[in-house]
Image: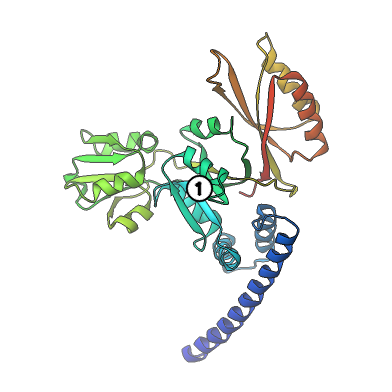
Amino acid sequence: MELKSLRKTVDNIDKKIIQLLNVRAKTTLDIAELKRKGGKSIYSPDREREVLKKLAIINKGPLSSSALEAIYREIMSCSLSLDRPLRIAYLGPEATFTHLAALKRFGSQVEYIACNSITDVFLEVERDNADYGVVPIENSVEGAVSHTLDMFVDSELKICSQTILDVTHHLLANCSKNKIRRVYSNPQVFGQCRIWLQENLAGVETIEVSSTTRAAQIAVKEKYSACIAALLAAKVYKLKAVASDIEDSPHNVTRFLIIGKTDVPPTGLDRTSIMFSIKDKVGALHDMLLPFKKYRINLTKIESRPSKKKAWDYYFFVDLNGHQDNPRVKKALLELEDKCKFLKVLGSYPLGE
C-alpha cells in the first residue's frame, strides 16, 4: 500500500476518533449531571480503576497498556474539565515529584494549586479551595513521610486513592560535569543518590534546599552549579541533563495519596488505612493485632509516630488489605476499637497500581 493511501486511512480513523471522543465527552457530562443531582462526587477513583482495568483486558496491541492508560488519563482529564475543572492541590512548587504524581493521576486539563507545605495541601482541601490534594506518603528507600502521617491525626480528610511513581533522579546543569562546584537538592534526594555522588562528584559541595524545584531555580542562575531533580525541571527551567538515572536503587518508587472529603465505594481490590493509639500496658500492641489475625486480614504496613501530646505516647498507622465495608474488616475494626484508646479510619481506596 502506498504512503498516500496509508495517510488517508489514518485521516479517516482520526475523524472517527474525534467523533467518538465528543460522544464520550457528552455522555460524561450527562453522568456528571446525574451525580450532581444525587449529591455524589464527580471524580470516582473506583470507576477510574474499573475503566483502566477493562482497557488493559481488551487491549490487543501494538499499543502497550501503559501507553493506553496515559492516553485515557488525558481523555478523562478533558472530560472532567468540561463540567468544572477539578482543582488539585499538591506539594509544590511546579516540577516536583508530587507535581508529576498529580499529573499522572489527573492529567493536564485540571487546575493545579502548588502549595508550600504538606500542611497547606490539607488546608486547601479542608477549606474547599481544592477538590483533592496530592501528598507523598512513603518512599521505598527513605521510608515514610512523617509530616503526612502527622497531618491525619487532626484532619478529617479521607484517603480517596493512591498513585505510585517510579522516581528517577537526574543531574541538571548548564555546564559540563567536570566544572560543577555545587549541587543543590532536597535532603531526601541526596539520601537516594549518596553513592553516585561519592563516586562521581567527590569533593563537590552539596547544599540542601526545600525542594528539587528550588534547586533547579538556583542552579539555572548560579555559574558552575547543578541540581538533582526530575527531567520535568530541565524542561521548565531550561537546564541540560548532565547525567541521568543517578539514584542508587533501581527500585526507587514513591507512593502518593489522593486526599479529599468523600468515601470511595469498594472495587474488590482495595486497601484501608487506619490509625490508633494503645493503652500503656505490657503486650498492648500484640493485643491490637490479634483481631486482624482472627479474621485473616493481611497487614501491609505498620508505622509508629510520637503523639506529641504526651511523652512516650505513640500513634500507630496501619495499612491493610480490604475495604472498611467488607464484613471481615468491619468485625476486626470493631474488636480493635474495644481494645485501643483511639481509632480512626483514614479511608478505603482502590489499590490501582
- The residue sitting at the top extreme is 282
Q: Say if residue 144 shows up in the picture.
A: no
Residue 134, image x, y percentages = 52, 46
Instruction: State the SS at label 1.
Output: strand
Q: Quadrant of the rendered structure where residue 149 is?
A: top right
Is residue 250 rendered to the left or right of residue 76? left
- The residue sitting at the front extreme is 127
Residue 141, image x, y percentages = 47, 34
Q: Nearer the viewer, residue 210 or 164?
A: 210
Q: Say if residue 256 shows up in the picture.
A: yes
Crowd tier of the residue under label 1, counting other residues whose Cα lies within 10 Å: few below 14, some 14–19, many 20 or above? some
Question: What coloring was used for the rendering?
Answer: rainbow
Residue 126, image x, y percentages = 57, 43
Amino acid beneath label 1: Leu
Q: Nearer the viewer, residue 126 or 115?
A: 126
**How many numbered discs?**
1
Q: Quadrant of the rendered structure where residue 197 is?
A: top left
State the residue position of label 1.
165
Is residue 37 rendered to the left or right of residue 154? right
Work out whether 286 lies above or below 173: above
Is residue 196 rendered to the left or right of residue 91? left
Work out whether 127 lies above or below 37: above
Residue 261, image x, y percentages = 64, 45
Q: Residue at x 54, y 43 (%)?
A: 256
Work out whether 187 lies above or below 61: above
Q: Nearer the viewer, residue 141 or 28?
A: 28
